[in-house]
Amino acid sequence: MATTVFTPGTDVQHDVPKPFVPSPAPATVVKHKGGFWSWVATTDHKRIGTLYLFTALFFFIVGGLEAEVIRAQLGGPNRHLVSAELYNQIFTMHGTTMVFLAIMPLSAAFFNFLIPLQIGARDVAFPRLNAFSYWVYLFGGIFITAPIFFNMAPNGGWFAYVPLTTRAYSPGHNLDVWVIGIQILGISSLAAAVNFITTIINLRAPGMTLMRMPIFTWMSFVVQFLIVLAFPVITVGVFFLMMDRFFGTQFYEVAAGADPLLWQHLFWIFGHPEVYILILPAFGLVSEVLPTFSKKPLFGYPVMVYSGIVIGFLGFGVWAHHMFAVGMGPIADSVFGLTTMLIAIPTGVKIFNWIGTLAQGQVKYSTACLFAVGLVALFTCGGISGVMHSSPPADLQQTDSYFVVAHFHYVLFGGSIMGIFSGIYYYFPKLFGRMMNETLGKVHFWINFVAMNLTFFPMHFSGMLGMPRRIYTYDAGQGWDTFNAMSTGGAYLLVVATSIFLFNFFRSMKKGKPAGPNPWGAATLEWTIPSPPPNYNFATIPTVTSRYPLWEGREADIESARINQQGGKTAQQLGIVLPYNTIKPLLVALSMTIMFMGLMFNYWVIGAGAAAVAIFLYAWLASPLEPEHH
Amino acid sequence: MSASTSHHYTTTGLDSRKIGIWTFIGSECMLFITLISTYLIYKGRSLVGPFPHEVWKDPSTGHVFHSILNIPVTSFSTFVLLMSSLAMVLALAAVENRSVPKRTLGDKILGSSKLWIFVTALLGTVFLSCQAYEFTSFVHEGLTIHTNLFGSSFFTLTGFHGAHVTVGVLWLLSLLVIDFKRGLNESDVLHVDIMALYWHFVDVVWIAIFTLVYLIK
């Protein structure tokens, strides 16, 4: 070990980086005090991240149970387990829940928890706005989910095509719930995206240049831009539908000359970037996990960054490939077919970079690493079937069939969910200060891997044999029976896998082995602080001199890591100013949800909600964020 | 976000609220692009009148509808909104130069943040009044959000913009209240600056709407 002394003011390039010796794992885990109230009123990004994680896991289970009902209904021909009407609600809510209430918020959990830690900040740029985003998500999620118990859940498919979803063809409250719920959830995502963009631009520690930023933060950065630019489009599209349904405008009224394709364009201009909003965070997590367990830096870091940005740009130019069947004409079809093939290139580049990272590394197949490798394998399968229907003639055969269902479950389950599981196993020690059980983790991985393929691979065949998606039931003898039985068996097995995961998760929270600051020997800033991190994160804001401070950092990195890992001091002792706890963001979020709900009841509710928003927003803006600084 | 975070270290040296508002404006651009695009896509697709630029005779009643857009009134309100941006600039300058001594009457007028914030809010209100007049006269002439695609997309687009102006006026009035209660000082410059960015953005959007909806036939 080199023992060169770092002299301030000189710029000595140390040839041999001094390896960082992490503090040993402590015997016990420091528990941060605080009861129910401290969670409700929190503005701490780590706590908000934890709230996101638990809420999103809850909705992930809800969406999963909905999927189980779908599979049970389709397990054999001519089943009538649920009514056709309820079935419509269940498949609609399965899609809506998984996209808006499970995968996006699971990613948001990681954005919240990780971005400030990875860039060396004490919190996000707007801590109270951050709390607001979470509460809006929670109330919006409850609002859109609860109606299923009253037979009032949305039933128009997750993309709610008009004119089916206009008042004339969907007279009940079901679509009202969807229209209002999606607008509420959009506000949550937009507020969070503004917050994270500002955080990443403005709160990086000294020396944390853009090209030293951990790749997860980079991918999150791209995702926030996608959210900021794509969500307004769906907001306006849904706003038109809301105006049509409640106030009698004619945006989607075909009899008045309206073009129903307007909805499809607006929806997919949002919808396709949304696909990258769902997958890029998982890509980022995997890009953190693979280097750590291969014991070498990410292969081609700059190319990973650029390909992420290119995916973000191209993501806005491929939307109409969801609409090849509507007859846009040969030129539009060709253009969107080509851009779709083009976007496979930066995605493929990422796959090769991950393989390059693993190649010749000392790979340790921990659970997190297994899930990461699982993503690389399964996402590649999903990507390839995606390129298959980038060709309009091929797509015409596959569209609206189970082949498409197989494709997007390979990218969303095999991609996003596997990446998020990888991230959960990897960051669990940082979140809770304890390790998850690796044996149970590996059992979870293998059952999950087998079950996932058993569920979704046969759908390629049932789709090719002509089984339409969203079908309620089917007759025997069309060649679909065996494949559907296999899919249903796989889906049941996924319940086993997820139960093992949940058991492991909650057991490890209490009984896991204490983790210490850096159990995996990872390299980035979040591992230079205690686990779980103190509320102020960094005792001293680190100065960053390298992409991997704990692997190749200079004396300055090592020194700040040494100080930060000690922990044990309170913010007051260190003279760190932290934001006040406050429930005002919660109150604004709640009154806003009530205001939107008023549309379904009467205008007085809207007025009362709006007045409450005004009062609580005023109280929020008029109160200081944190104690006066001296 | 009212509390000052200026004492914190930031990477760019800028206050986070400034980056936040720019990001928000970027998002708002997509909102208005979508609304304006919808209006343009639906232009000329309405099956019944009244129409924005063409005369329409109702075949069933024989009633003749004139082209409905009132260019002179809207030109006036556009001018008012543009002038409100000028007043906003003067208001920001007045807050920024609060500590500069004012000797002449001209200095005092130019340096009065209360006056210029009030003028900005007033001009914004005049614009909104013109819009209210426009909307009611359209309804009297037979154009509502239910009438045709033009009515639906026109009222939604300009209504969205009007809502943004309304938020801006309320924001200005709250600044005015602060100015009367304790006076705006150096620590408020950023707040006024952000307000001004929002106001100018809403103004620029109106220029796009005025050109694309009112002027181009």
Image: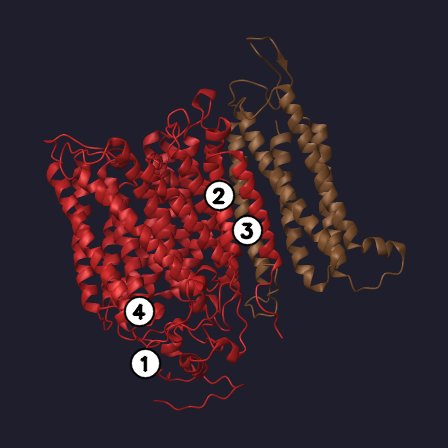
Chain colours: A red, B brown
User: Circle 1 sits on which residue?
Assistant: A26
Residue type (three-letter) at the residue carrying disc 1: Pro
Chain letter belonging to callout 4: A
A225 horizontally vs A377: left or right: right
Residue type (three-letter) at the residue carrying disc 2: Ile
> Which of the two discs, 2 and 3, sits closer to the camera?
2
Q: Is label 2 in contact with label 4 (beta carbons under 8 Å)?
A: no
- Give the percent coordinates (x, y) of residue A130: 48, 58
Disc 1 from disc 2: Cα separation: 47 Å
Residue A594, numbered label: 2
Q: Secondary structure at mark 3?
A: helix
User: Circle 4 sits on which residue?
Assistant: A291
Disc 2 from disc 4: Cα separation: 46 Å
Residue type (three-letter) at the residue carrying disc 3: Phe
In depth, the one of A603 and A245 nearer the eye is A603
Q: Secondary structure at mark 2?
A: helix
Answer above or below: position of A619 versus A536.
Answer: above
In depth, the one of A201 and A211 nearer the eye is A201
> Which of the two discs, 3 and 4, sits closer to the camera?
3
Disc 2 from disc 3: Cα separation: 24 Å
> Which of the two discs, 1 and 3, sits closer to the camera?
1
Residue type (three-letter) at the residue carrying disc 4: Pro
Disc 4 from disc 1: Cα separation: 25 Å
| Label located before the other in sequence (4 or 1) | 1
Residue B24, numbered label: 3
- Give the percent coordinates (x, y) of residue B99: 79, 64
Q: Picture quarter containing residue A512?
A: bottom left
> Which of the two discs, 2 and 4, sits closer to the camera?
2
Chain letter belonging to callout 3: B
Q: Picture quarter containing residue B129?
A: top right
Disc 1 packing (10 Å; few <14; some 14–19; many ≥20)? some
Q: Taking the image as drawn, is residue B50 in sight?
A: yes
